[in-house]
Image (cartoon, rainbow, N blue to C red):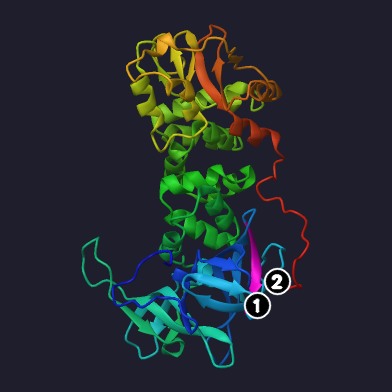
């Protein structure tokens, strides 16, 4: 079954065939070589305009392992059916860079406003059907459009219709923002890291349009996966209120790293607009050096009392929003149970909890043999501790042995890897001919 993206009305016939393909439903489909080995998945369709005919399809943007997006010429596509694309198996693995005149349907065309040639009004492009003619050439065959809504209700949507390319004309005022609602819907199932990569591959203006449409939580997730320069660039284009809302949704350590890149005046301005509890966590992290355990840690690990039971601890680590590294153990302290806590008593790994009955008290099974790291410990020292004891997280304490946070292996990797590790390309050797 094809992945369901933004869904048009029931009369919308969007099944993939060898003759007509709706692009929003093609996105995410697997790409295979002739022997059935998976090469990647479709991320977009590339078109070029023509003066006297509908735009011609020249290829697909395909995401291959390593989250790299490459170009697959439409001439190398032998079949599109049942939610999959079959190619000749020859793909140039050089990262896709659009050339002048090339337009990506999902990234740049959906959401554009068009006017009907008969003067009956305007509409917004929600999907595009491409079709193969008898000569084997693919081109835009039909547009799926949504007209302006006729109801004042905020939940109402305008009626939809189909139109051929020659029945409409593009209509866009210079400087006018392009609707990104449909594109955001097509990104709804992307993993945060994939979403970040996809956003950074968009033209700058389109990236900002999409960022403005994304929910705060989704944009926060994507920002956490981006290089710091890109994070700052996007944050600078958002209004202060929206920027503060997004920072509230980020993990405190990621928000602190991002804010640390800003001028002091803007940093304080955004902190003042954030939720007080979130801002307090971020301010605490900003007091530590970026290459210390305090600067790398999260101040929100799972903390329980010695009287808490195994059942209570397991219920907390089951929360879906909890990072896996932080769900690996719970920390047992004296009161208070929010950082900075009372004295750290030890920790209980989830595997140990599974060996005991649900009513067992954590104080009876706590592991107090592991030495916590001081907040001033270097990132290298933290890495050595994690590697030496095969751990995914470590407790971080202050001089009074109070728990102030936990540093996880992914935090240390982010620091130890090169700054450009998220976007660094592998050797750009091609398995096929040049584009």
- Residue 81 location (% of width, % of height): 49, 76
In this orientation, which residue lies closer to the viewer: 125 or 175?
125
State the quadrant of the C terminus. Answer: bottom right
In this orientation, which residue lies closer to the viewer: 14 or 209?
14
Alpha carbons under labels 2 and 1: distance apart = 7 Å
Q: Is residue 56 above or below residue 282?
A: below
Most common secondary structure along the magenta stretch: strand
Q: Is residue 7 magenta?
A: no
Residue 162 lies in what quarter of the image? bottom left
Between disc 2 and disc 1, whose residue precedes?
1
- Residue 355 location (% of width, % of height): 43, 21
Q: Is residue 70 magenta?
A: yes
Q: Is residue 153 above or below residue 363?
A: below
In this orientation, which residue lies closer to the viewer: 176 or 207?
207
Residue at screen point 53% across, 8% down: 401
Assess whether mark 1 and mark 2 are in contact (beta carbons under 8 angstroms): yes
Number of other residues with Cα within 10 Å of mark 2, as a class: few under 14, some 14 to 19, many 20 or more: some
In the image: residue 312, left or right of residue 347: left
The number of callouts visible is 2
In the image: residue 191, left or right of residue 148: right
Q: Is residue 205 above or below residue 315?
A: below
Residue at screen point 48% across, 60% down: 209
Dot 1 falls on a residue whose secondary structure is: helix
Mark 1 = which residue?
A: 76
Number of other residues with Cα within 10 Å of mark 1, as a class: few under 14, some 14 to 19, many 20 or more: some
In the rendered structure, which segment of residues is drawn in magenta?
A: 68-74
Dot 2 falls on a residue whose secondary structure is: loop
**Disc on res. 90:** 2
């Amino acid at each position: 079954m094809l992945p369901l993206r933004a869904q048009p009305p029931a009369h919308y016939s969007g099944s993939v065939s060898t003759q007509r393909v709706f692009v929003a439903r093609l996105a995410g489909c697997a790409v295979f070589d002739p022997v059935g080995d998976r090469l990647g998945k479709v991320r977009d369709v590339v078109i070029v305009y023509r003066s006297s005919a509908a735009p011609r399809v020249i290829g697909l943007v395909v995401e291959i392992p390593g989250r790299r997006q490459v170009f697959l010429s439409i001439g190398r596509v032998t079949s599109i059916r049942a939610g999959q694309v079959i190619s000749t198996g020859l793909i140039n693995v050089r990262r896709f860079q659009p050339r002048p005149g090339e337009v990506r349907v999902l990234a740049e065309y959906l959401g554009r406003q068009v006017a009907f040639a008969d003067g009956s009004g305007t509409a917004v492009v929600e999907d595009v059907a491409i079709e193969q003619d008898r000569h084997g050439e693919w081109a835009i065959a039909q547009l799926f459009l949504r007209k302006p809504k006729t109801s004042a209700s905020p939940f109402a949507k305008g009626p939809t219709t189909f139109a051929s390319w020659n029945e409409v004309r593009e209509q866009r005022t210079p400087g006018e923002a392009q609707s990104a609602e449909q594109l955001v819907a097509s990104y709804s199932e992307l993993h945060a890291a994939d979403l970040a990569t996809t956003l950074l591959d968009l033209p700058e203006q389109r990236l900002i349009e999409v960022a403005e449409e994304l929910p705060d939580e989704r944009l926060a997730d994507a920002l956490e996966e981006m290089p710091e320069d890109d994070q700052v660039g996007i944050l600078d284009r958002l209004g202060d209120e929206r920027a503060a809302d997004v920072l509230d949704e980020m993990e405190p350590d990621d928000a602190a790293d991002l804010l640390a890149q800003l001028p002091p005046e803007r940093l304080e301005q955004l902190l003042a607009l954030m939720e007080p509890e979130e801002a307090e966590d971020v301010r605490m992290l900003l007091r530590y050096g970026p290459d210390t355990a305090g600067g790398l840690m999260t101040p929100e690990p799972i903390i329980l009392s010695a009287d808490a039971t195994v059942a209570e601890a397991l219920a907390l680590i089951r929360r879906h929003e909890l990072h896996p590294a932080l769900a690996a153990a719970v920390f047992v302290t004296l009161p208070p149970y929010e950082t900075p806590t009372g004295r750290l008593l030890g920790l209980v790994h989830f595997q140990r909890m599974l060996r005991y009955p649900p009513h067992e008290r954590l104080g009876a099974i706590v592991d107090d043999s592991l030495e916590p790291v001081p907040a001033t410990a270097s990132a290298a020292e933290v890495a050595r501790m994690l590697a030496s004891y095969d751990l995914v997280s470590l407790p971080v304490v202050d001089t009074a042995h109070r728990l102030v946070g936990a540093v996880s292996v992914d935090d240390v990797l982010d620091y130890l890897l090169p700054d450009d590790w998220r976007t660094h390309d592998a050797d750009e050797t091609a398995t096929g001919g040049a584009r």
